[in-house]
Image: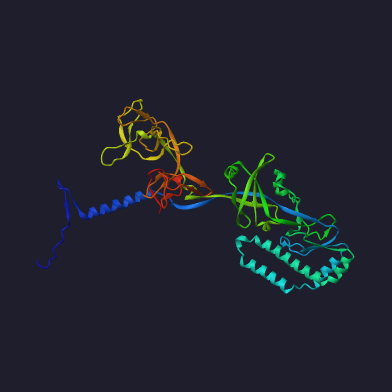
Amino acid sequence: MAGRKKKRKRKIIRFPGGMHLNIGVIVFLFVAFYMAYNIYSYLTTVHIKGYEVEKGTIEVNTSYTGLILRSETIVNAAQSGSLDYYLKEHTKAAKGTLLCSVDENGNVSEKLNEAIDSNAVLTKDSMRDIHSSIRDYANGYSDRAFYATYTFKSDLSGQLMEALNLEALNEISEYTEFAKDNQTFHLYRAEQPGVVAYYTDGMENLTVNDLTEELFDESALEKTSRKTEGFVQSGQPLYKLITEEDWQIIVPLDATMKNELQDKEVTRIRFKEDQTTAWANYTIERKKGRDYLILTLHNGMIRYADERYVDINILLDQQSGLKIPNSAITTKAFELVPNAYLTTGSGSSGQTGLLVEHRKENGTFTEAEFLPVTTYYLDKNEDESGNENPDKETWMAYISEEKIKRGDRIVRTDSSERYEIRNTAKLRGVYNINRGYAVFRLVNELFSNDNYTIVEAGTTYGITQYDHIALEGDLITEGQMISTN
């Protein structure tokens, strides 16, 4: 009939012998196979985190607690009596600066305290100085350096004491003059310039020649603060002056650090308390069977005027190179073969490999067959100076091939010489995953800390910047398919 639509013929592919397939079936089978392959690949591929190799630096440092030595002069009281201070501790005092007073009968000291209580008013200059100290502290405040709050509190208390005591002393000047005339009130002024401290610990006269291991026992330190006493006996310390800016930090040395510092004269150190760094000249001296590092600094002493011990890091040279996580580094075993036995296969591929005779169970060998191999490292038998041995017959290649076993023999090209595979060795390296499967790459480790290792860049058989490596090297094997999704 004219109005009847023609049926569309299905396209059929006919094969010899009468076989034929519908095109739709072919497309369906192709899609099904593709999906099955992807599901299989996903299930059999190791899913692991990757890491992109970047250049980086690790600072070589070692922690020590050092003993501080400096030039300290103790001034003792010539009389007994009430003790009052007028200068903030751990500040610089010029020669003639009023530091403290001793009142033999206590009357002046009592009047001084009454004047402070009744007229606790600071001068404009004192208020300006205190405001400046508070502003500087507030501007530099950091939660990560909260420990500085306690230092600030102590400094501010000392600043207030200094200002109030001096004002009170001026208030009762007539009374103090009378007491001085009667030789019952005595003012002590700095006899020379220096940093003033109001504590003693019995180590003021120590020198390098006095060093013993017992001196580094912090728990044995007996530190006495004169400010908290309020009274002094004749002959007891009033204060001490640190009279020179040069100071020393003494550190007991272990053999490793001694070797690192040998034949040098200067090193950089970091103070743990505030993370500041400084350069120090040093010498290494042996005292009573123990090696000590004598660090000499020429500034910054005032920051540690109230300390006898200080925690530092000795910062050696920074190591730079390719920075990788320690977890990426693993070891891999290799067969060692003479490099001279490596040959090139026939054909256009030009693959490097070995002529291998496999050992049979009965002890005989198969005919030699060519097996392509990859050289992971070439040991050129270098001497201590890093010069390679010119005799290439001594060079050994590190290879890894599942079809080659210990006991097999390799044949040297154009020769009847044979070499039995018997030696293996391990190398440290990482797995490169740039192409979606694991390839072992050798690393030359320069330095490491708890988390990262610096490896040499530009090495043969190694890795380069921007390579992607497996973050967990121990979880995968050579040639394994890797997914970082």
Horizontal and vertical percent for residue 13? Answer: 17, 52
**Camera-nearest residue between 404 and 443:** 443
Is 74 displayed left or right of 67 in the figure? right
Horizontal and vertical percent for residue 424? Answer: 43, 34
Is 355 displayed left or right of 159 in the figure? left
> Which residue is found at the position 31% from the left and 40% from the top?
351
Q: Residue furthest left?
A: 1
> Which residue is found at the position 39% from the left and 38% from the top?
400
> Which residue is found at the position 79% from the left and 73% from the top?
119
| Residue 437 visible to the viewer | yes
Q: Quadrant of the N terminus?
A: bottom left
**Camera-nearest residue between 240 and 26:** 240
Quarter-of-image position of residue 138: bottom right
Horizontal and vertical percent for residue 358? Answer: 34, 30
Horizontal and vertical percent for residue 264? Answer: 58, 46
Colouring chosen for the image of the structure:
rainbow
Quarter-of-image position of residue 163: bottom right
Q: Is residue 311 above or below residue 424?
A: below
| Residue 323 visible to the viewer | no
Is 5 displayed left or right of 443 in the figure? left
Q: Quadrant of the C terminus?
A: bottom left
**Callout count:** 0
Quarter-of-image position of residue 106: bottom right
